[in-house]
Structure formats: C-alpha cells, structure tokens
C-alpha cells in the first residue's frame, strides 16, 4: 500500500505538469495568433502589381510578368489609350524592348498628335545615338514616319539623334535636311541652338550653310548654348574645335558669359581643370590645338584677375605645366631659307611641333 504522503505528492506533480503544459500551449497559440495577424496586416500594405487582364494590351507589352511585347497581341481600341503619363507610342519609344512594336502601333492607328510628349524625343533621351543598323526595316521605317509626319516641333535631343553617324548611315539625317529646307528649324520655330544640338559629325554637311543663312549664326549659337564647343574641348575633338573656332575666332581665347549671372571662361583654363577632360590624351589634344591657334597661358582668368592660366595649372595640376609650353615653330620665308628648306616650305609640309618647358615653370 502506497503512503498517502507519497501519493498526494505524485498527484500534485502531475497537476503542475499539466498546468505548465497548458500554459505553454496557450502562449504558443497566442504568439502564432499575433504573427498571423501581423502577417495579414503587412500583406495588406504590399503594393501588388495589377493583374494582366486589367491592363490595356500596350500596358501588358511593357510588363515582363505579362509576357512583354508579342507581335499580334495589341488591340486597336487600346493603341491611343494613355498610361503611365504618356501615350502608347511614347511609352514604346522610351523602352528599347518595345521599339519593334512601334510599327504595329502605327498600323493599328496610333496617332502621335495624341501624345503629350513626342515619341522620338523619348527615344532620343533614352539613347542619344541608337544603332539604327540593328533595327528591323519595319522599325526603321516607323522611326522615319514619326520624324516626317509627327506634329511635334523637333527637340534638341531629336536633332542630335537624327544627325549622328548611325542615323547618317541609315539615311535618317535626310529628315533633318528636309526640316532645314522647310524652315522647320528656323530660329523663330525652335527655342534652342540647332548648331549646338547637331552631332559634330554633321557640322560640315552642305545643308548647314543653309541653316546658318536662316539665322542660326554660330556666334549666337555660342551665346545661347556653348555646350557643343565645351564637349569638344573635353573630348579632344580637334576637328569640331577647328570648325567652331573658324566660325567664331574669339573662342580660342574666351567663351562669353551665358547670362549676367555667369562669368565668361577661358577654354585653355577649362581644359586644365581637374576632372574636365575625358582623359589625358583628350586634354593634350585640346590644349595643343588652342595653343597653336594663339591661346595665351598668361591670360588672366575672369573673376580671378590675379591668377593666370599658368598660375592656375601650377596650383591644381603641376604635372601639366609642360603642356602649356607647346609652341608651333615659325618658318623663315622661302627666299631667305636654304634650298632644301625652301623646297620643304613650297611643298606645304611643316616640321613636327616641339614641346619645351616654359620659362615661367622653371621659376
């Protein structure tokens, strides 16, 4: 027979175990309940993408989870319905993956005049000079159609895109030539400098003379927007620098202030600025061109009259001081030169430029 004391103690321990197990189970259930509630709240705040069947067919073409653009899936009733703040043509133009859908949109009746932003402007902002040679013929034809038949005034990015080398090879630059002939790009019709917007490779095209005659004078272009000249400086594009300085000779020495709030700047000092040039080769090419054209390293920097270009270079990039010593040797007249030298000069050849250390740099 068990002792009453021992029996009661065993019962008591069993009750406590059951009580602890019940409390633990309750706590677990309570925690799980809280987690489930929290999860439900969080899920309710997640911005889930709209279901594909609630979108127009052009919208679906721009959604990878809807399968992206697939030829033949667009519906006529959808091609002029705007979404994401733009018409379908503009939305397709600003997404490279849907460029091949432009012909289908046009064939189904998409109208550029229904667009707040020109489709080609969106394309040019996305890519300044697309590789038109890789476009399908139908897509290239659609781009030309948008350029020739669009109701929007051409923008600076569009002029740049359609005058770049890839566009020239694809025959699209003919559209810009047509705009010039039709006065579409006259100063009264566009709010930007067309000369500055043109791709540098088109500056020597025959129709540029017509553009200049229409009122787009190079000096006014610089006053309005000197970015094309500045870009040529940064890239060491000597051919473009030569064109601009031939048209506007004072650019060798100084670029005028754009507004009264700005100061004029010296191209030679700008080239010597840290982080300005694309690389050392571009810096050297631009500096040597400016120096050979007459730029003066001793010219004083506007706004810092106590500092010359040479002073500035010695302070910021002393390793480039020798670059400012570039000189183009002068040749004696053929009559005073020895026979061999006279023959060399009469042939139009010139000796290689030399580089020497500037006297000021040694002080």
Image (tube, rainbow, N blue to C red):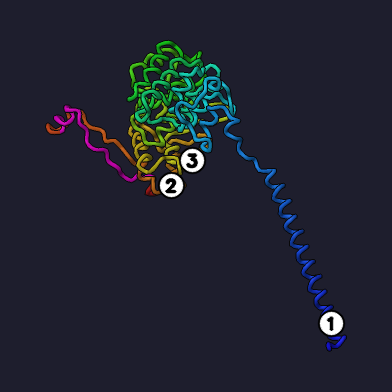
Residue at mark 2 to residue at mark 1: CA–CA distance: 92 Å
Label number found at residue 137: none
The front one of 44 and 255 is 44
Q: Residue at x 79, y 67 (%)?
A: 22
| Front residue (pair 169, 301) | 169
Q: Is residue 296 above or below residue 191?
A: below
**Can the viewer see residue 223?**
no
Q: Which of 256 and 90 is in front in this view?
A: 90
**Gap between marks 3 and 2 measured at Cα:** 14 Å
Residue mark closest to the camera, 2 vs 1: 1
Give the residue at the far front of this rendering. 1
Q: What element carries label 2?
A: loop
Q: Dot 1 corresponds to which residue?
A: 9
What number of labels is visible? 3
Q: Judge by depth and name the residue closer to the eye, 117 or 7.
A: 7
What residue is pinned by disc 2? 317
Name the spot of residue 286 as percent of width and height, x first.
Answer: 37, 36
**Image mark for residue 307:** 3
| Place of residue 3 in the rendered image (x, y in percent of width and height, measured from the top left) | 85, 88
The disc, 2 or 1, on the residue closer to the chain's N-terminal end is 1
Which residue is at 26% across, 33% downward? 330
Q: Judge the density around disc 1: few (<14), some (14-19), many (≥20) Cα neighbours within 10 Å.
A: few
Q: Which of marks 3 and 2 is in front?
A: 2
Crowd rating for badge 2 (residues with CA inside 10 Å; few <14, some 14–19, many 20+): some
Question: Can you tell which of label 1 and label 3 is closer to the viewer?
Answer: 1
If the image is split into quadrants, where does the N terminus sit? bottom right
Is 344 magenta? The answer is yes
Magenta-highlighted residues: 341-360
Find numbered disc 1 in the image and state the secondary structure of the residue it sits on: helix
The CA span between labels 1 and 3 is 100 Å
């Amino acid at each position: 027979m068990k002792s009453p004391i021992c029996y009661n103690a065993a019962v008591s321990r069993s009750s406590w175990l059951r009580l602890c197990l019940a409390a633990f189970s309750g706590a677990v259930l309570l925690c799980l309940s809280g987690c489930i509630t929290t999860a439900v709240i969080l899920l309710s705040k997640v911005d889930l993408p709209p279901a594909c069947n609630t979108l127009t067919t052009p919208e679906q073409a721009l959604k990878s989870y809807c399968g992206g653009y697939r030829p033949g899936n667009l519906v006529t009733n959808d091609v002029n319905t705007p979404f994401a703040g733009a018409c379908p043509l503009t939305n397709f133009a600003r997404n490279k993956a849907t460029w091949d859908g432009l012909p289908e949109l046009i064939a189904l009746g998409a109208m550029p005049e229904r667009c707040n932003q020109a489709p080609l402007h969106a394309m040019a902002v996305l890519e300044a000079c697309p590789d038109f040679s890789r476009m399908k013929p139908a897509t290239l034809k659609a781009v030309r159609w948008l350029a020739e038949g669009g109701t929007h005034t051409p923008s600076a990015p569009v002029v740049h895109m359609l005058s770049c080398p890839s566009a020239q090879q694809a025959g699209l630059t003919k559209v810009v030539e047509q705009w010039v002939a039709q006065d579409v790009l006259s100063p009264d019709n566009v709010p930007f400098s067309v000369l500055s917007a043109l791709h540098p490779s088109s500056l020597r095209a025959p129709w540029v003379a017509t553009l200049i005659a229409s009122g787009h004078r190079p000096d006014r272009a610089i006053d309005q927007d000197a970015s094309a000249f500045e870009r040529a400086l940064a890239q060491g594009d000597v051919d473009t620098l030569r064109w601009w300085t031939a048209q506007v000779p004072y650019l060798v020495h100084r670029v005028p202030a754009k507004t009264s709030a700005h100061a004029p700047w010296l191209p030679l000092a700008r080239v010597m600025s840290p982080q300005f040039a694309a690389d050392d080769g571009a810096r050297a090419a631009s500096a040597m061109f400016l120096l050979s054209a007459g730029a003066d390293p001793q010219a004083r920097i506007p706004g810092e009259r106590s500092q010359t270009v040479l002073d500035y270079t010695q302070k910021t990039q002393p390793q480039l001081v020798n670059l400012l010593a570039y000189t183009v040797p002068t040749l004696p007249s053929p009559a005073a030169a020895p026979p061999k030298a006279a023959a060399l000069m009469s042939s139009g050849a010139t000796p290689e430029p030399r580089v020497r250390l500037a006297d000021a740099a040694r002080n």
